[in-house]
Image (tube, helix red, strand yellow):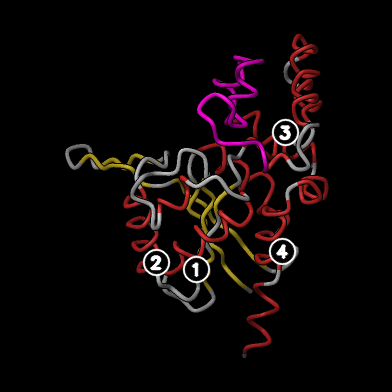
Amino acid sequence: MIRLNIVAEGQTEESFVNNVLKQHLALFNVFASVRCIETSRSKHYNTVYRGGFIRYSKLKKDLELWMKQDAHQEVRFTTMVDLYALPTDFPDYSLAQKQRDPFALVKELEKSMLTDIAFQRFIPYLQLHEYEALVLVEPAKLSTFFLEHAKAIDSLNNMVSRFESPEEINQGENTAPSKQIISRIPEYADLKVSVGASIAEKIGLDTIRKKCPHFNEWLTTLEKLDSQDSQGK
């Protein structure tokens, strides 16, 4: 049995883990827990604020704290944060400014993160380019929540068809996956936490994996954690 601790960028990713990934990974004897990045604390009210990938240092601090708190050998750690709007203090941030193959780029950045965290039971993961790439695997599923936006959903379908994978949809300020959706369906901005995870669930992991190779590689790695651990004993 493996316990997997996931530090997520925000509530949308947290909801996706809780409602979709947890059940799937349990089939592989991998039991996930998730929490959003700690961004600040209020000493006066003893309150912890979580959510948002504003600074890499916050993510690193939260990860390392959790690693100290849960140092058992059966525990693994991973992240689910966006490549889009990557914080400028991210290791080898200059790589993110280069125009190149996104799949090669994200692997290099994850390698830099792994070197910086320097923990052998850590599996870095950056979502290409944003969580909403998973939603755009089948834009038609948005109609479940936004029936009145049939034309907008058709427009999203046409946009997505220009890419081999939704993970290729770029990280421009106005053209990132979430921006593509919100520009056509403004209501998504306020409903993304609940709607984002629900749509991914309706699409199904099998379909998402076929369309999102980087996500598929990460999930495949997570599925193998228990069997690899058993072989190593």
Disc 1 marks which residue?
A: 122
Give the residue at the far front of this rendering. Answer: 99
Callouts 3 and 4 close, C-beta under 8 Å: no
- Residue 116, above or below 102: below
> In the rendering, at what x and y percent does residue 198 appear?
70, 34
Q: Earlier in the sequence, mark 3 or mark 4?
A: 3
> Is residue 33 or residue 176 the one in the foreground?
176
Q: Residues within 10 Å of mark 1 (few under 14, many from 20)?
A: many
Callouts 4 and 2 close, C-beta under 8 Å: no
Kind of element beneath mark 1: strand
Left or right: 205, with 112 as reference point? right
What residue sits 74% from the left and 14% below the top? 152
CA–CA distance between discs 1 and 4? 15 Å
Q: Earlier in the sequence, mark 3 or mark 2?
A: 2
Query: Which mark, by number, is residue 117?
Result: 2
**Amino acid type shown at disc 1:** Phe
Disc 4 marks which residue?
A: 220
Kind of element beneath mark 3: loop
> In the rendering, at what x and y percent does residue 128 appear?
61, 46
**Amino acid type shown at disc 4:** Thr
Q: Earlier in the sequence, mark 1 or mark 4?
A: 1
Does the magenta run of residues contain 191? yes
**Amino acid type shown at disc 3:** Leu
**Amino acid type shown at disc 2:** Ile
> Is residue 73 or residue 180 the one in the foreground?
180
Does the magenta run of residues contain 57? no
Disc 3 marks which residue?
A: 136
> In the rendering, at what x and y percent does residue 81 appear?
51, 47
Left or right: 128, with 121 as reference point? right
